[in-house]
Amino acid sequence: MVQTLVSTSEPGQDPPGTLMPESINIYKLCRETRSLAEVSAELNIPLGVTQVLVSDLAEQDLVYIHPTITGSSPSENQVLERALRGLERLFQ
Amino acid sequence: MVSNDFSSDKRSNRKKMSSKIVIAGGFGAGKTTLVHSVSEIPPVTTEAIMTEASIGHDDNSITPDKTTTTVAMDFGRITIDEELVMYMFGTPGQARFWFMWDDLVRGAVGAVVVVDCRRLADSFDAVDYFETNKRIPYIVALNKFEGHLDYTSEQVREALEVSPEVPIIDFDARNRLSGGEVLKTLLRYALEHNRTSEPVA
């Protein structure tokens, strides 16, 4: 999903030389955690393409895909409450 | 629990998670302005290539009836704490891009429909979308242009056929705190919504 965060699995290592140039750029960029939307915007790659490249990288364990909070299950209410408290702190 | 040794860096980084809020509404209602006023980064525009069925190409029956369109959408970010980031995505306002809402809405915590009271009709499709789908909680935010509203929230509810339980609030999209109030209202409603609604298969 557009908000999904991506991190390079081993940020200290160089990207494998077999990767496509776009994937190398994603590998390097995600040494600092970023969302798919940000990767797409910063590298100027359309969202759909970014999604495919990132999932290919994830399949090779080169990047880590972070969990997303959708709020659709009651088990996530704790996180939603944390988000609400955070907003109350930031916008007061 | 925070540990400072380097070996745990990666693991603590992995605890990061994200969520998203969708900002919908008619063209020019104030969606981008809202994203702008609450975001910690200048709003970013990204492009998505979307496929849509083409309409009215009667001159050519050989080509497939699909065309691809490049759609721009704006997004902003709020870092809640070191582990939780929230993104706000502004949906394209033009009617012909509504087909991409499904993709954008999937997995969202909730949505805000921004309404310009001077052009109520422009927001009808956005409200209709969330009323019909009922997949995510949504609220209606009336943008006060020039500091006043032409209608009461109840008049707007009736005109746009907004369900009685859906919160309608007024705000100023240019004001950061006012925008923050909209997001808080949405989260409070989403929490309440989760507690009362039956689990859906």
Image: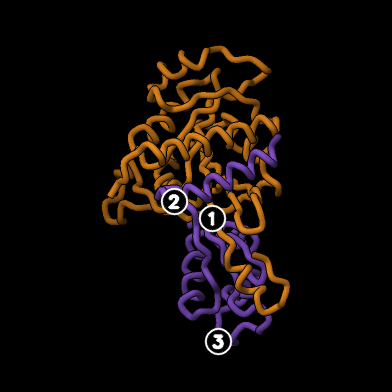
How far across and how far down the image is residue B168, in percent?
50, 24
Question: Residue at left 52%, top 68%?
Answer: A65
What mark, if any, has residue B107 been given in the picture? Answer: 2
Instruction: Name the colour assigned to chain B in the rendering.
Output: orange
Instruction: Name the colour assigned to chain A in the rendering.
Output: purple
Q: Residue furthest front?
A: B1
Dot 3 corresponds to which residue? A18
Q: Residue furthest bottom?
A: A17
Determine contact: label 2, label 1, CB under 8 Å. Answer: yes
Dot 1 corresponds to which residue? A3
| Discs 2 and 3 carry the same chain letter | no
Q: Give the structural element (helix, strand or loop) at label 3.
A: loop
Residue at mark 2: chain:
B
Q: Quadrant of the N terminus of chain B?
A: bottom right
Q: Say what amino acid the circle numbered 3 marks.
A: Thr
User: Residue A5: which quarter of the image?
Assistant: bottom right
Question: Residue at left 61%, top 53%?
Answer: B85
Q: Nearer the viewer, residue B37 or A89?
A: A89
Q: Say what amino acid the circle numbered 1 marks.
A: Gln
Mark 2 residue crowding within 10 angstroms, few (<14) / some (14–19) / many (20+): many
Whichever of labels 1 and 3 marks the residue nearer the N terminus, that label is 1
Image check: A16 left or right of B164? Answer: right
Question: Residue at left 52%, top 46%?
Answer: A80
Q: Give the structural element (helix, strand or loop) at label 2.
A: loop
Q: How many marks?
A: 3
How far across and how far down the image is residue A78, in percent?
51, 49
User: Residue B125: which quarter of the image?
Assistant: top left
Residue at mark 3: chain:
A
